[in-house]
Amino acid sequence: MQSPVVPRIPLLVPELPTLEALTPYLRRIDQRRWYSNFGPLVSEFEARIAASFRQPGQLQSSYAVTVGNATAGIELALRALNLPRDSLVLVPALTFVATATAVLSAGLTPVVADVDSEQWLLTPEIALDASERLPLRAVIPVATFGCAQDAAAWTRFHAATGLPVIIDAAAAFGNQLDPGPTCAVFSLHATKPLAAGEGGVVVTHDAAFAATVRQLSNFGIDLSGAHGVPVGSTTLVGTNAKMSEYHAAVGLASLDAWPHTSQLRRDCFERYFVVIESACGSQLQWQAMHCSAIRSVCCVLLSCQMQRDRAETELKLRGIATRRWYLPLIHEHPAFQRLQHLPAPCAQDIGRRALGIPFHLSLDQDAMTEIAGTIAVALTTA
Ligand SMILES: *Cc1c(COP(=O)(O)O)cnc(C)c1O
């Protein structure tokens, strides 16, 4: 049997805490013998996440609810809205399949919209236009490749339309600093900037919303005794999406390292950008993102589909991994082909020209130079 070809330069190299960093947290689990169901490590992790959303001068409190993964977090946030079955929920064409999966799992109907050509985001303008054509009941703007959504603009959108806004900020921890009018959902998957291996966290300014998501994550069992029913009654139809103490241990150790790892990611991307720009010049286009954004992946736009395909082939020949991140577009996946979709010319254009190239903290200067040089060759061999 042939072994699969392992690329010489991988696309991603997850950065998770070492055994040494984990040990103090694992000892605490041994001592307490509390392994799941809102244990002390989960509570501490949630408190630290919530505190990280406290902005100077901001009056609103933030609440963080851990979940098993971001996909479950989006589904439960939708369920917490208590919308009628098959309600229309706007999602972008350019996103990970989980955005649409969560909508369908919540018994709702995704409608696919375009993204803007600069930041590659489903913007409030796009959603406003869609809401005038269709009876939408909610919107899920995605923080595409970690690019923050404008929370203030979404709050204005919410005030104008009354529509709830669940920001899929799966890859945007550290960038999406405000959860917006309803909530933001972050992933703690191994490949995201803040990792617990698997996990997610729903962040919101709304205490009651947070409590409902928490209850839904524990089968819908009401532990508050606040609704005139005996404690332990099931008052909502939820699921099991709780985060274990072991995952919280990894998340806490990742948070300890976060000031360091997030800065390493910024610095690494900055060096990479300079190397690629100097080799490829203005022939490449980049997603417009805040200069201090923390990246988990790197995706560039070639000038046309032929050039993208050529760069992809050249990189592969040299053992350099690539990925067409978030492609095909949502409504082009076989499972989602029957979804209603609005015209998406920007997403289609990005889809033809985008290429994900390696990005991780083990990329040294030589690897960066080789990747940049290979793309440059593909650009010149017209
Ligand atoms: C990674 C990702 C998800 C899924 O997160 P999980 O924690 O793996 O469920 C959802 N949406 C987007 C945009 C993502 O990048």
Image: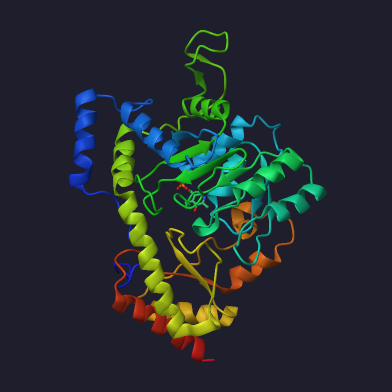
Quarter of the image for the N terminus: give it: bottom left
Quarter of the image for the C terminus: give it: bottom right
Residue located at (64% from left, 36% from top):
107
Tell me where residue 95 sits by quadrant: bottom right
Q: Is residue 300 above or below residue 210?
A: below
Work out whether residue 292 can be spotted.
Answer: yes
Q: Position of residue 105 (x, y in %)?
A: 58, 39
Residue located at (45% from left, 33% from top):
241
Q: Position of residue 193 (x, y in %)?
A: 39, 53
Work out whether residue 338 can be spotted.
Answer: no
Give the farthest residue toward the bottom. Answer: 381
Q: Is residue 7 above or below residue 294?
A: below
Q: Is residue 7 above or below residue 63?
A: below
Give the farthest residue toward the front. Answer: 57
Q: Is residue 269 above or below residue 263?
A: below
Residue located at (47% from left, 39% from top):
54
Q: Coloured how?
A: rainbow
Q: Position of residue 232 (x, y in %)?
A: 47, 13
- Towards the viewer: 7 or 164: 164
Q: Is residue 196 left or right of residue 72?
A: left
Q: Position of residue 302 (x, y in %)?
A: 55, 78
